[in-house]
Image (cartoon, coloured by chain):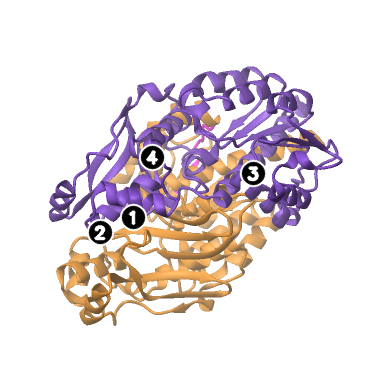
Chain colours: A orange, B purple
Amino acid sequence: MIGYGVVGQGLTSILMRRRAETVKDYGFNPKIVAVVDKGGAAINSRGLSLEKLEALKKKGSVAEDAAFGHPKMSALDVIESVEAEVVVEATSTNVKSAEPALSYITKAFKTGKHVVTTNKGPLALAMPALTELADYNHVYLRFSGTVGGGTPMLEFAKKCLAGDKILAIRGILNGTTNYILTEMAEKHVTFQQALASAQKLGYAETDPSMDVDGIDTACKVVIMANWIMNKKLTLKNVDIKGIRDVSLQALDEAAKRGNTIKLIGSIDGDKPTVKPTEIAKNNPLCVSGVLNAVTFVSEFAGEETIVGRGAGGMETASAVLRDLLDIRHKLANRLLNSNSE
Amino acid sequence: MIGYGVVGQGLTSILMRRRAETVKDYGFNPKIVAVVDKGGAAINSRGLSLEKLEALKKKGSVAEDAAFGHPKMSALDVIESVEAEVVVEATSTNVKSAEPALSYITKAFKTGKHVVTTNKGPLALAMPALTELADYNHVYLRFSGTVGGGTPMLEFAKKCLAGDKILAIRGILNGTTNYILTEMAEKHVTFQQALASAQKLGYAETDPSMDVDGIDTACKVVIMANWIMNKKLTLKNVDIKGIRDVSLQALDEAAKRGNTIKLIGSIDGDKPTVKPTEIAKNNPLCVSGVLNAVTFVSEFAGEETIVGRGAGGMETASAVLRDLLDIRHKLANRLLNSNSE
């Protein structure tokens, strides 16, 4: 595990609470052999105690463990030297260079390790190259937590529409901007006032650019277009317009038509875009507050919309667990295939 | 194929249009060896021509085929005598005795055939017994089209929340009643007026009891509770109240609170119920018109809502195709398992 913030800690917490069920229902009984945080690493090839990890983290860093701690040991050294089947990469997103996550993921692939990441940066900038590198090394790359938090939007599109074809995707994919637009429309406050309120509640960062300028939404559009519609896109292919210029007047005029304005990320054909868009209030996609929603337009099953919380440490951790179970399932099938040849 | 109405014809149409993709993507190249409608059967062990079936149906019955027609041959005789891997059962729903579908399904099981059904009757009345009988005969029973039409509500819950646990389910599961309640609330018309409008548009039957008395919704609650939450329920376990008594006054008062009234089917713990329920208009579950929606409350991923069209021949046919692909996938895995033993 590289990165041990809310998602990493959420994952250890879920694993502790549901160990009996994951063993019984999926034959899944993972050992966490190494954890890296900003203070260094804790390593034990026989498996670290999850209870102990939580306690250490509260004191500062997992590297402080007397027996298994390696203060200052780097993530790259850990990935290189520790034997593990999967690297869970949960460091913070960087859309300029995708580092250091990009190096962690490629190092993992080159040492034969599958990767589950919750990090949009490497995918937004280099997803076509990363999926190719994973294939080349015969390992899996999974990233359910990057879109929709715990809401399984990617899985829905991949697993629930077999035999059908997804023609277009439209989504409200960022809770912060949706909160701001909802506040503006409902409480009649300006963008600046709504942003301040979002920052006060912890929904927006001090530098809110990733959210309000549409970059976070664009990353998710890239991931969905590539994964679900077999495109080969990166962030630079997306036309992006954020919500800074959405005026109260525009919201009022939309309201008169029974509509409102939402930040919609979409891909229809080959044109990925992110922009403030007027939609009907009774459109299922039109969710309020910090909720996320996505509509898949399919050839036969019609339009389907999935709504859920788009963030949260525990929710995103549940997506990591799903990815781990998916990899386990794929490995079991691979084993069966090779045995029967 | 037993029953060749809008769903059966939708299925042949999808199979014709997507044959190249289903072969390429899933290795799935089915032959339809027998079709039964009210006029009799058409049978060809080498596979019936899908184009010809469509043309025959337009003339009256598939049994009129000069070479392969068997006028008056019964469905039970066809299921008994024809070699096939899967029976697609798409006759109309009967919630009193579940017949004749119940006999068709049990006959299929006893002759070693998997079943895909779009028929709620047998499941509502006898789902625990049917799943046991399928297990006993080592065959699969699938029924995605019975809930949500083409919207993969059952698959979402089963396939997209691995490692998590669904604690409760709440849904608007009947398009007709949702259309009526939406009309009443938005156009301020009485139940009788809205029902007449639904009948005129073909959304409601001449005898609207299945819909407006909540029975259709209750059938779907039974199916979801059994399939998703491992209950052993039948229709008689559900507390059912329909929408005949929902007044304009009650809708007006709900509206003053920012709410409205919807027919909600739910299971929370062990208590399945169907009843008109006041919910907030900004709740993602609160969809309008003929749309269906279901909210799954899960332990870690939070509340997730799926919205889609709840009916339609082509949509439901797409659910049948998904079930066929799922069975194919399971059979392939079963083969691999036995080879590697």
> Which label sits on residue B208?
4
Q: Quick one: B170 or A24, which is closer to the camera? A: B170
**Which quadrant of the figure has residue B266?**
top left
Q: Which residues are magenta?
A: A28-35
Cα distance, mark 1 to mark 2? 10 Å
Query: Could you tell me which secondary element the residue under label 1 belongs to?
Result: loop
The residue that mark 2 highlights is: B186
Q: Which amino acid type is marked by label 4?
A: Pro
> Which label sits on residue B288?
1
Marks 1,2: beta carbons within 8 A: yes
Q: Which amino acid type is marked by label 3?
A: Gly
- Work out which quarter of the rendered image holds the N terminus of chain B and state it: top right
Q: Label 4 crowding class (10 Å Cα cut-off): few <14, some 14-19, many 20+?
A: some
Identify the chain of the residue marked 2, using the numbered disc in the image: B
Q: Position of residue B237 (x, y in %)?
A: 36, 22
Q: Position of residue A104 (x, y in %)?
A: 53, 59
Q: Which amino acid type is marked by label 2?
A: Glu
Cα distance, mark 1 to mark 3? 28 Å
Q: Which residue is located at x 44 percent, y 40 percent?
A: A68
